[in-house]
Amino acid sequence: MKVCALAGGVGGAKLASGLQDVLSPGDLTIVVNTADDFDLWGLHICPDVDTVMYTLAGISNPETGWGIAGESFETLNMLEHFGEEAWFKLGDRDFATHVLRTSRMRSGETLTEVTARLSAALGVESAVLPMSDDPVATVLETQEGRLEFQEYFVRRGQRDEVFGIELRGIEEARPTEGVLAAISGADAIVLCPSNPVVSVRPILALPGMMEALTSSSAPKVAVSPIVGGRALKGPADRMLASLGREVSSTGVARMYEGLVDGMVIDRIDERERAGIEAIGMRVLATESVMRDAEDRARLASETLEFGAGMVAH
Ligand code: FO1
């Protein structure tokens, strides 16, 4: 069974690893957000792609969800010694990823090609596909002015209220051939529990992406990242509120209206079932918090079974 998952950072990577565990090797493709990519010290950094890649390789830092387990930070310490600001915590081994990626891209390889090479070297069994080989950058409108994504997210610790989001470059960007092929060849499409505004939306906003998704007859299931009115990780709850959206799985379902056939929500949000069904989606209420590998695999198989039992539109 071929599955195509759309994912952003940590929450998306967790469900992707559960999907990888329950599917046959090679049956999973993860299309990853690249709108939070940025350059630092001349290196091209792709936090969401790397989070998914390291998680699927089984080497991610279990405490943070991003970066590599057991990292050292000697390079960053030296940069700080040289007077540089070290707000983005790049570990020594993680640096190797960015050095190689940047060097290969400068020699003409695409981000997709470099990611395939890095993933294969790390023993990842699934296809990790950047959503696009064209640059897209999330820029947030705040009371402090316009902030680049990592400036907002890491440097300023997500403390600013977000009034608007620009996806710079989105109109000129295109999904890759590989992404379009993964969607058209999928038996099920899963929208991972990633931030719907800054992780999933950039993928959906790529020109041609909604058409590709809606012309697939595969069931489409989204797993809500909001549990009990709060985001499991990151600022999704505060972002939804400041953008005037309802902070609930129903609010997330509204953002996916017309695309998604079913929503997986947490058991504690069972009372939202009727409201989501009224939007035209089926609902599976289950334990959606992924604490360990067992939780990830269980949620992944429940999500796939839920999709398989649905007639796609
Ligand atoms: N997130 C942080 O909150 N602080 C960091 O210092 C940080 C460093 C970092 C390094 C490499 C990487 O791949 C990811 C990193 N992240 C860090 C996570 C990342 O910024 C966010 O999780 C995503 O961009 C949001 O999806």
Image (spheres, grey):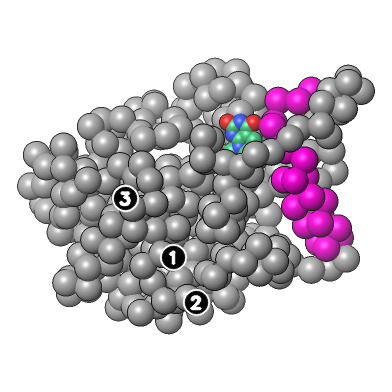
Q: Which mark is residue 26?
A: 2
Q: Dot 3 corresponds to which residue?
A: 295
Q: Which residue shows up at 16% across the image and 54% down it? A: 284
| Mark 3 → mark 1, Cα distance in angstroms | 13 Å
Judge whether residue 281 is colored magenta.
Answer: no
- Above or below, comparing residue 58 to residue 232 in the picture: below
Q: Residue at x 22, y 46 (%)?
A: 287
Query: At numbered mark 2, what does the secondary structure look like: helix, strand or loop?
Result: loop
Is residue 104 a member of the stretch shown in magenta? yes
Q: Position of residue 208 (x, y in %)?
A: 49, 68
Looking at the rendered structure, the kind of residue marked 3 is Asp
Q: Residue 194: x and y, percent? A: 42, 46
Give the mark nearest the N terminus, 3 or 1: 1
Which amino acid, mark 1?
Answer: Gln
Q: Residue shown at 77%/57% (left/top)?
A: 101
Q: Which residues are magenta?
A: 84-106
Residue 59 seen: yes
Mark 3, residues whose alpha carbon is within 10 Å: few (<14), some, or many (≥20)? some
Residue indicated by mark 1: 20
Using the image, determine if residue 61 lies above or below residue 310: above
Q: Observer-nearest residue: 216 or 44? A: 44
Q: Amino acid at mark 2?
A: Gly
Please give the count of numbered marks on the rendered protein.
3
